[in-house]
Image (spheres, rainbow, N blue to C red):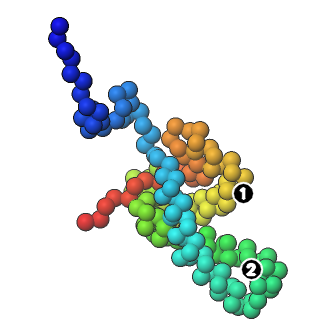
Amino acid sequence: MEKRIKPRWRTIKQSKSHTPNSNPADTHKSPFFLVERIIAFITDMFMINMPILYIAYFVLGSKEAFLGNQIVIFSCVGVFGIILSLFIASSGQTPGYRYVGLKLVAQDTTEGKVPFVVAFLRYVLWIISMATLVGVCIAYFRKDRKTFYDLVCHTNIIQAPKKS
């Protein structure tokens, strides 16, 4: 009777890069990058939006004047969107995206650049999606992991190529 030797668990794990039934071609081409996107959002809020809010607060002079003036608050949101859209249109990356290594590209064009109008529309749709949470949650039910605003604007978030 021949005794069969069982391989060790580590040997099996190191020899397989993925589960036996998974096919690399079946994985989605546009990952959601949830953690990276949250880190990029927080970075953009502190690097871009906070200085805008501090300038508006300084000009108005007090907290009550700032909170009571909805036009200024709306203007701060608009200026933040314009600045983000300029970053996206010029390089495809905001400072937060650059920090985490992501890039926003258009899926319809050959060079992948996102025009300013599309980037700003994406920002407006992002605000609506965050307010309703439906547009963001769509990504969890789709195989390609695209959010509502990425579907409408035909954009993809990809891992930025490494610069040497």
Which residue is painted at 43% across and 53% down in the image?
Answer: 158
Which quarter of the figure has residue 4? top left
Residue 22: image location, x then y, percent:
38, 30
Which quarter of the figure has residue 163? bottom left
Q: Residue furthest left?
A: 2
| Residue 108 in view in this figure | no
Is residue 7 rendered to the left or right of residue 24? left
Residue 39: image location, x then y, percent:
51, 63
What's under tag 2, amino acid-wise?
Answer: Val
Circle 1 crowding by C-alpha within 10 Å: few under 14, some 14–19, many from 20 = few
The reply to whether dot 1 and dot 2 touch (C-beta < 8 Å) is: no
Label 1 – label 2 distance at C-alpha: 20 Å
Residue 105: image location, x then y, percent:
46, 56
Q: Nearer the viewer, mark 1 or mark 2?
A: 1
According to the picture, the residue beneath numbered tag 2 turns out to be 72
Q: Is residue 127 above or below residue 107?
A: below
Q: Split into 4 quadrants, where in the image is the C terminus?
A: bottom left
What's under tag 1, amino acid-wise?
Answer: Ala
Q: Split into 4 quadrants, where in the image is the N terminus?
A: top left
Q: Residue furthest top?
A: 1
Q: Is residue 63 above or below residue 1?
A: below
Which quarter of the figure has residue 6? top left
Which residue is painted at 63% across and 58% down in the image?
Answer: 126
SS at mark 2 in the image: helix
Residue 129: image location, x then y, percent:
67, 54
Is residue 92 rendered to the left or right of residue 149? left
Q: Earlier in the sequence, mark 1 or mark 2?
A: 2
SS at mark 1 in the image: helix
Circle 2 crowding by C-alpha within 10 Å: few under 14, some 14–19, many from 20 = some
Which residue is painted at 25% across and 31% down in the image?
Answer: 8
| Residue 60 in view in this figure | yes
Residue 131 marker: 1
